[in-house]
Structure formats: C-alpha cells, structure tokens
Amino acid sequence: MSLLRPKLPRLAFVAMSLILMGALVAAPSVSGAKPAAVKQFTASISGGVVAGSFTETVTNCGGPILPEECTVSSTIGLGAVQIAVPTEFQPITSVSASTPSGTTWTASYNAATKTIDVIAPGGSNKLNPGQSLLITFNATTTACATGTKTFMTSAWGSNSISGSEPFTLQGDQPAVACVGSGGGTVIGPNGQTETITGNFGGSLIVTFGGDLDCSFDPAFGSQWSQFHLPTQVNITPGADFVAGTSPKISTSKFPAAEADSSSYLICYAVPTAGHTAFATRGGGLATEQTIDGTQFFVGILPNCYNPITGGTRTEPCVSEQFLELATNKIVISVRMLPGDPFKK
C-alpha cells in the first residue's frame, strides 16, 4: 500500500539559503575567521526482498530540491558512515555500499564494536550535497521480538570512522519494527498504525516510507494520486519468518483527509520472483516494474468481494474499507497470500 503524499518542493528555500551562504562567504570578515562548514545528513532504512536483508540510504543534505528533514544544504562532502547494529540483527553476514552513480565504498562489519563501517574510497568520491549512499546488508537473526529496533547512524566529513567534521542527523534515526508470530501493531508517523494478523511463524519487518507509485494506472491512476494512505508501509520477512497456511491480513488506520473511505486506493507491490501478476482494480493485471534494483508486480488492488460473481477474489485484495466514526480515521485491510513478503 502506498501511503506517501507528495511533498511540497523546497526549491525556493534552498535557493535563498545558497544565496545567503554565498553572501556570507563573500563578505569580509571582521575577525578573518573562516565561516563554519554546514554538515547535515538524513538516513532511512527498509527491509529487502530476501529474508533478513536491509538497505539503509544515507543522503548528504542538498540538491536542487532539499529533502524535507534538512534545514539547509551541506557545504562539504560526506566521507564516512557508521551504523550501530541492534542486538537482534547481529552478526551481519555481508555488507556492501555504493552510490546510485556506481561508485563502490569500502564497507565492513566490525564484530568487536557491532557496527557497520563504511568509508569513501578517496576524497573525490565523497557524497556531495544532494547525493545518496546505499548500504545493503544481511543479518542472521533467528528471533526478533515485537518492537522497534533502531540502527543508530553517524557520519563524518573525513574519510575515517569517528574522524573529523562530524555531521548532524536531520530527522529520526533509522528504525525497523519487528512483528512476531501471529501478528501485532506498529505505530508509524502522523498517527498511522499498521496491524498484521495471520497464521505465520517467526517475524515480519515493518518500515514506513518510500515512493511506490500507481499513478500510471489507466483507469484509477489520477484518483490514486490524490487519495492514498499518508505514508507507505513496507512489510518484508525477517530471517526467521515461516509462512503459515492461511492468508495474512494487514490493516492500516490513519486520520481521514477525505470522509468517503471508498475514495482511497491501495497501490501494492510484490516481487516477481515466485509470484504471478495479480488482478488489479481496473480489471487487468499488475505490471512489472523495477524498484530499488528488484523486479516487482505493481498495481491498484481490487476489493476481495466480486459483485459480478458474488464470490471472493484471489489474494491480494482489499477485504475491508471504512471510516471509523469514533476516531475519524480511515481503516483499510489488505488480504494477502500466506507466504507473501511484500511491499505496499
């Protein structure tokens, strides 16, 4: 289910900030002191398609459109990142890091400090303002109790861990939520919750955020762009996940921006590996798209009840959708196959 509302661009603010900084650098200094460097970064994490895998994205604040969490563009490059790994995900069995442009950074797991250490290969390969680094790793956890697990992340301008020019994190530290056997409820941003139930063992990993987009749908794409959940929910298998024998149900509850609950549509994605294209609300089949380097079937889900046949459609589908009057919140439940690790 995609829940991400379009963010207002901050281009004007960024331009103003850069102009002001330029004036600050150009103006003669009374003391002759060099202006302090601006060092800000953001970090987010999501579960991968493979059980126990994760990707953390680290971004040096800047670019033509400033990320929402950033207050101003950084003025120097970012050269090193360290991630403290929660106990439930130790040890890390493999880790790699690269930029979208293809530059590979040195990445390793330090068993003594229980950290993932990532360093740029030379000063010219540091993250410039506006650039991002993708850190992908695998954990061998066999149990993850229900609750939120934080991957404390630090960054520096130097090409060394705990070096010089420390950066300041903007926004929250990256975190994932574990939902144990049988299900549980996870609290997301802006009062949004996700409740998962079903006959499964082990754990599921829940993260919030992303840019899943169903505006391409010929029948309902324009409606989806205006009526969808506030923040995207990603649900993937933990390393200890065991599929049950009955469908899982994932229920989103969030403050209503539109009282008519039927206006909301659910954009759903499932990996193509091991799956077939599911039926969509418009009567067709989900289309194949690449998301973060992995192939997914993506489409807007139909209701589980089929008024034409009077029967129930095959999962995945929307099983419940209504406005909860007591709380003025929209409630939408998605029914999926027992073993489906999925992103929605």
Image: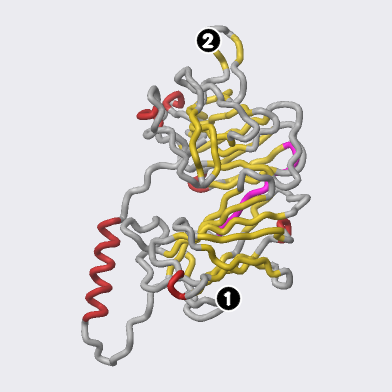
**Left or right position of 144 against 103:** right
Are there few (<14), some (14-19), or many (20+) residues within 10 Å of tag 1?
Answer: some
| Residue at the top extreme, as displayed | 309
Label 1, on which residue?
161
Of the residues shown, which amino acid type is indicated by label 1?
Answer: Ile
Q: Which residues are magenta?
A: 174-182
Q: Residue at x 44, y 58 (%)?
A: 101
Percent position (x, y) of residue 49? Answer: 62, 43
Residue at 52% x, 7% y: name it: 308
Looking at this view, is 322 or 296 the one in front? 296
SS of the residue under disc 2: loop
Residue 108's place in the image compared with 162, above or below, is above
Q: Which residue is mark 2?
A: 307
Q: Is residue 8 left or right of residue 137?
A: left
The quarter of the displayed image where residue 193 is located:
top right
Q: Is residue 312 left or right of residue 265?
A: right
Which of the 4 image quadrants contains residue 107? bottom right
N-terminal-most mark, 1 or 2: 1
**Side (left or right) of 91 relative to 185:** right
Residue 59 pos. (x, y %): 46, 61
